[in-house]
Amino acid sequence: MFYQKVNKRSRAAMTGFLARHYRYNTMNSLNCFTSYANNVKIQNLDIPGELQDLAYDVASGEVEAPDWDIFFARTVSDFYQRTGYHIGFNGRSSGYLVLYEAQANEDGTYSLYPGRSIDMYEDFAGWDMQDLRGRVELVQDFDKTCDRLREGFIFMLEHYAPGEYTEVKRIPHRVMEPTGKSLLA
């Protein structure tokens, strides 16, 4: 859905890909910084109609889906391990996945730099081909990871069914009960 092939032997193809890639705010519209992003609002994810109500319930937090939370965290952590960058949600309804700069901490966690832009005003004219390829590969990896997250979310919706209501922090939530297939497999 998000990943695009790019001719990495062509400067024009690579700079065009980066220049046309969707962008979103790194914090909010007040800081005026943007980074590479993908719109992941439920209505834009091509989720089968019979699963859309459940998708909205999970996205809103009305339905707890712990396997989804673990899958998301592991996928984002794997991306960080490969690239040194982080993926996080942004927007009023968390409808965008955004590429963020990050730095590893000594305790194994990492710090985000949401106030920074990535390539916001870059024209890439001074970049050599190797650096340009590296940036394209990073953004393609980001897009592939967003595709993997979308696919994992849909898998979870297809293989989990709403269970009993449980009370969490005095707010009723439905908990997703496994149907025998793991999102983490």
Image: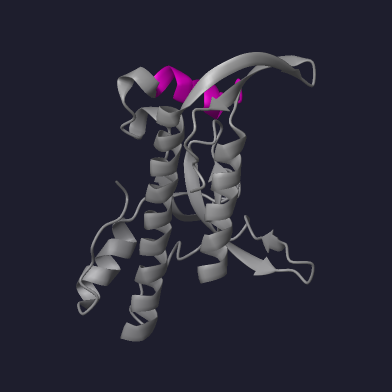
Residue at the spot 35% in from the left edge and 69% down from the top edge: 136
Q: Point out residue 106 in the picture as x, y percentages from the top left corner.
A: 78, 72
Asked if one can make out residue 33 in the rendered structure from this viewpoint, the answer is no
How many marks are shown on the rendered structure? 0
Residue 55 inside the magenta-drawn segment: yes
Q: Point out residue 94 in the picture as x, y percentages from the top left corner.
A: 54, 36
Residue at the spot 74% in from the left edge and 15% down from the top edge: 171
Residues in magenta?
52-62
Color scheme of the displayed model: one colour
Q: Point out residue 113 in the picture as x, y percentages from the top left corner.
A: 64, 60
Does 8 sit left or right of 40 as displayed?
left
Does 38 sit left or right of 77 as displayed?
left
Judging depth in this view, the residue of 31 and 142 nearest the camera is 142
Residue at the spot 31% in from the left edge and 84% down from the top edge: 129
Asked if one can make out residue 77 in the rendered structure from this viewpoint, the answer is yes
Q: Quadrant of residue 138?
A: bottom left
Examine the residues drawn in magenta and state their main secondary structure: helix
113 vs 146: above or below: below
Outermost front residue: 180
107 vs 53: above or below: below
Does 31 sit left or right of 39 as displayed?
right
Q: In which quarter of the image is residue 140?
A: bottom left
Residue at the spot 32% in from the left edge and 20% down from the top edge: 49
Judging depth in this view, the residue of 8 and 15 nearest the camera is 8
49 vs 135: above or below: above
Q: Point out residue 180 in the picture as x, y percentages from the top left corner.
A: 49, 33
Residue 42 inside the magenta-drawn segment: no
